[in-house]
Amino acid sequence: EPEVTQTPSHQVTQMGQEVILRCVPISNHLYFYWYRQILGQKVEFLVSFYNNEISEKSEIFDDQFSVERPDGSNFTLKIRSTKLEDSAMYFCASSGQGGSPLHFGNGTRLTVT
Amino acid sequence: AQKVTQAQTEISVVEKEDVTLDCVYETRDTTYYLFWYKQPPSGELVFLIRRNSFDEQNEISGRYSWNFQKSTSSFNFTITASQVVDSAVYFCALSEAQRGGSEKLVFGKGTKLTVNP
């Protein structure tokens, strides 16, 4: 069964550094998402992306965050200047046409020191 | 605003017991979707079920069953004859369709299920 792939599985970075989290969504999916889960807490929506533009973003997704689909397969989340509170599990997800369910990747655990 | 409440923070059962995880939701939309995801200790989110607001039929998949009741805004999940491998955090989620057809999920805080041998 096709799956969403995220790399790396764990990223450690220093406060103030830029970090890029990478995702390869399911190939025929059209909608792409990033969600975040701070340790021990619920999963929170960050942003949705469709037709090469952001369709919705949450208040968490401030100017420090950006998303990009640089080619036909990758979908990236960039955090420009990481803060300690950005430490979390970041999940990429994708969905197909007509409201098919979201499929999540295995997540990237980001640790900001 | 949409909201999902999972009142049970943690549940502990002994193997082979049945267990029900509760989920209550709030939305003003008439069209919405409800989900359950499983998060095992390894951390990934595993899709279990998606149900649209117009389909109130209960669903059974092996040892899993779901009870959707619009009248009480609940979408409860029952595991029959629980097994140790069922130990995980289970999340209930709600979505409304966004413009262009994408979905934004609102998650509950999750219920941590521990199944003891």
Image (tube, coloured by chain):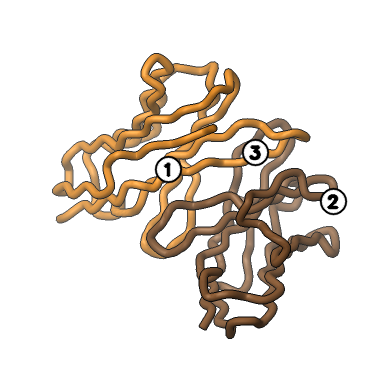
Chain colours: A brown, B orange
Q: Amino acid at mark 1?
A: Gly
Furthest toward the top, the residue is: B71
Q: Amino acid at mark 2?
A: Asn
Q: Nearer the viewer, residue B93 or B38?
A: B93
Give residue A53's position: percent from left, percent from top. Answer: 82, 50
Residue B67 in the figure: left or right of residue A25: left
Residue wearing tag 3? B103
Residue wearing tag 1? B108
Q: Nearer the viewer, mark 3 or mark 1?
A: 1
Tell me, yes or no, if residue B72 can be seen here.
yes
The residue at the point 51 percent across, 83 percent down is A113
Name the secondary structure under disc 3.
strand
Say which mark, if any, is on residue B7: none
**Cα–Cα gap, marks 2 and 3:** 16 Å
Give residue B38's position: percent from left, percent from top. Answer: 41, 49
Give residue A99's position: percent from left, percent from top. Answer: 67, 33
Q: Is residue A108 above or below residue A91?
A: below
Residue wearing tag 2? A52
The chain letter under disc 3 is B
Q: Amino acid at mark 3?
A: Glu
**Cα–Cα gap, marks 3 and 1:** 16 Å
